Each structure stands twice: as structure tokens, then as C-alpha cells.
Image (tube, rainbow, N blue to C red):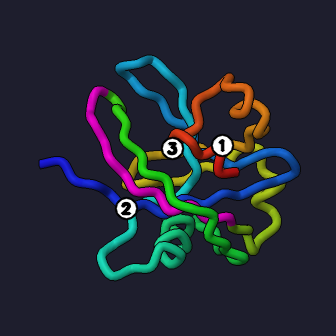
């Protein structure tokens, strides 16, 4: 049974770069990017979910959380349809060393992830897909 997933996603900005998780769609043979974050649990506020997810994924503490907006995201990934309601937040790392790393490795649901700083202009010029669709317009 398909369900709509509520997510909290964090926008971290360094100069003119955004921190995004790199993914790969095996069916479409496409590299894609998405901000860090994850599912909001029942009874949990989006801001708290973002704090928890960033801690779980890359072991980082965050503050300065600011709500930016919501995006309803319907998509197909690896041949499977998906539907999400994405709460988008801007946030900052408490430890400034995260801004000095070109690549940040972590775990999401027992799967290794890699987050990288990508210039915003790459997404504005549509050279690489940034998900959820419409996020670049919100930024």
C-alpha cells in the first residue's frame, strides 16, 4: 500500500553552495541530489525531526532553524512511485568544521550516504537534478 511520507529537509548554505546528498537512480541511470533530512515521526514537529535526522545521518548538531516552505513531491525513483510532503528548513551547523569538508559521509537507514557542497548555479542552470522538484525556486 502506498503512503504519503512527511519529511523535514535541511538547507545548509556555504558561500554560494548548498549541501546535498548524492543519490543514483538505477532505472533512469541518473545522478540526483537532495538536501539532508528525513521522515517526520508521528507526533514529532518538523524542526525536531530535522535535528534528529541530521544527528542520525551525519552526527551533527544544528541550530538557527528557519522554516522556508512546503513542497508536495510526487516522483518515481528506481521504478517505484513516491509521494512526499516536504517541510523545508534553512539551518546552520553548530560545529563550523562541517563547512570545511568537501564531502561528508554518513548513514541513512543503514545505507552509506555522501553529502557534498554543490554550487547553487549548477541547479539553477539545470545541469543536475535537485529534488524535491521546485526546491531551487523556493531558495
Tag 1 residue? 136
Estimate the x, y position of residue 101 in percent, counting from the top left.
78, 50
Q: Residues within 10 Å of mark 1 (few under 14, many from 20)?
A: some
- Left of 136 or right of it: where is 43? left
Q: Is residue 109 above or below residue 24?
A: below
Q: Residues within 10 Å of mark 2 (few under 14, many from 20)?
A: some
- Which residue is rendered at x = 63% and y = 27% of the image? 128
SS of the residue at dot 2? strand
SS of the residue at dot 1? helix
The foreground one among 105 and 64 is 64
Tag 2 residue? 6
Q: Is residue 67 above or below residue 106?
A: below
Tag 3 residue? 132
Residue 86 on the magenta span: yes
Asked whether the residues under the numbered discs 2 and 1 touch, taking CB atoms below 8 Å apart as contact, a structural biologist would say: no
* Main secondary structure found in the magenta portion: strand
Q: Tell me the magenta residue range.
A: 79-90
- Which residue is rendered at x = 73% and y = 68% of the image? 92
Asked whether the residues under the numbered discs 1 and 3 touch, taking CB atoms below 8 Å apart as contact, a structural biologist would say: no
- The residues tagged by marks 2 and 1 sit, at their Cα atoms, a distance apart of 19 Å
- Which residue is rendered at x = 54% and y = 26% of the image? 31
Amino acid at each position: 500500500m502506498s503512503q504519503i511520507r512527511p519529511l523535514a529537509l535541511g538547507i545548509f548554505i556555504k558561500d554560494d553552495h548548498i549541501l546535498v546528498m548524492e543519490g543514483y537512480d538505477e532505472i533512469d541511470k541518473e545522478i540526483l541530489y537532495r538536501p539532508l533530512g528525513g521522515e517526520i515521526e508521528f507526533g514529532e514537529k518538523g524542526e525536531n525531526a530535522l535535528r534528529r535526522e541530521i544527528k542520525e545521518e551525519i552526527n551533527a548538531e544544528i541550530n538557527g532553524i528557519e522554516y522556508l516552505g512546503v513542497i508536495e513531491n510526487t516522483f518515481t525513483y528506481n521504478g517505484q512511485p513516491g509521494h512526499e510532503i516536504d517541510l523545508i528548513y534553512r539551518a546552520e551547523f553548530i560545529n563550523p568544521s562541517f563547512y570545511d569538508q568537501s564531502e561528508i559521509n554518513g548513514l541513512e537507514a543503514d545505507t552509506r550516504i555522501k553529502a557534498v557542497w554543490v554550487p547553487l548555479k549548477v541547479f539553477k542552470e539545470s545541469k543536475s537534478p535537485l529534488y524535491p522538484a521546485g526546491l531551487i525556486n523556493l531558495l
